[in-house]
């Protein structure tokens, strides 16, 4: 059995901040100026990945976000 500790509030704050920066850096490097809502969506998704790790069940969610970004921002 894996011994997994729950992140503290301070840990979660650091994770949120770093994933927010990563999200913004990634989107802007792709030439996308995201809405605040889209930035929060991507940040939340990455935060979940950091806290909970990789789960193959989440792949459709990531693919849906990629599709949404491509359709919303890259086709304009």
Image (tube, grey):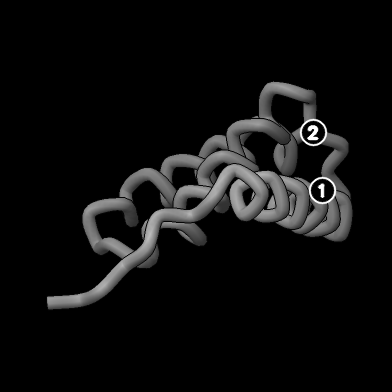
Camera-near label (1 vs 2) is: 1
Residue 41: assigned label: none
The answer to whether residue 70 of the structure is visible from this angle is: no
Q: Residues within 10 Å of mark 1 (few under 14, many from 20)?
A: some
Nearer-the-camera pick, 33 or 7: 7
Local SS, label 2: loop
Above-or-below relation of 66 to 54: above
Q: Position of residue 33 (x, y in %)?
A: 87, 37
Residue at image location 71% in from the left, 38% down from the top: 75
Q: Position of residue 29 (x, y in %)?
A: 86, 59
The answer to whether residue 47 of the structure is visible from this angle is: yes
Location of the N terminus by quadrant is bottom left
Local SS, label 1: helix
Q: Is 18 on the left-hand or right-hand side of 63?
A: right
Above-or-below relation of 76 to 64: above
Residue at image location 54% in from the left, 50% down from the top: 8
Q: Earlier in the sequence, mark 1 or mark 2?
A: 1
Q: Residues within 10 Å of mark 2 (few under 14, many from 20)?
A: some
Location of the C terminus by quadrant is top right
Q: Is 54 on the left-hand or right-hand side of 70?
A: left
Q: Is 46 on the left-hand or right-hand side of 18?
A: left
Nearer-the-camera pick, 76 or 42: 42
Marks 1,2: beta carbons within 8 A? yes
For label 1, the residue is 24
User: Which residue in the rendered view is the most extreme toward the left?
Assistant: 1
Q: Quadrant of residue 64?
A: top left
Residue at image location 79% in from the left, 33% down from the top: 34
Residue at mark 1 to residue at mark 2: CA–CA distance: 8 Å
Residue 34: assigned label: 2
Q: Is 44 on the left-hand or right-hand side of 38?
A: left
Residue at image location 73% in from the left, 36% down from the top: 73
């Amino acid at each position: 059995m894996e011994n997994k500790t729950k992140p503290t509030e301070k840990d979660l704050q650091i994770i949120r901040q770093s994933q927010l920066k990563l999200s913004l850096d990634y989107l802007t490097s792709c030439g996308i100026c995201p809405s605040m809502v889209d930035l929060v969506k991507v940040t939340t998704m990455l935060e979940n990945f950091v806290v909970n790790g990789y789960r193959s069940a989440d792949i459709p969610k990531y693919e849906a976000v990629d599709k949404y970004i491509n359709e919303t921002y890259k086709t304009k």
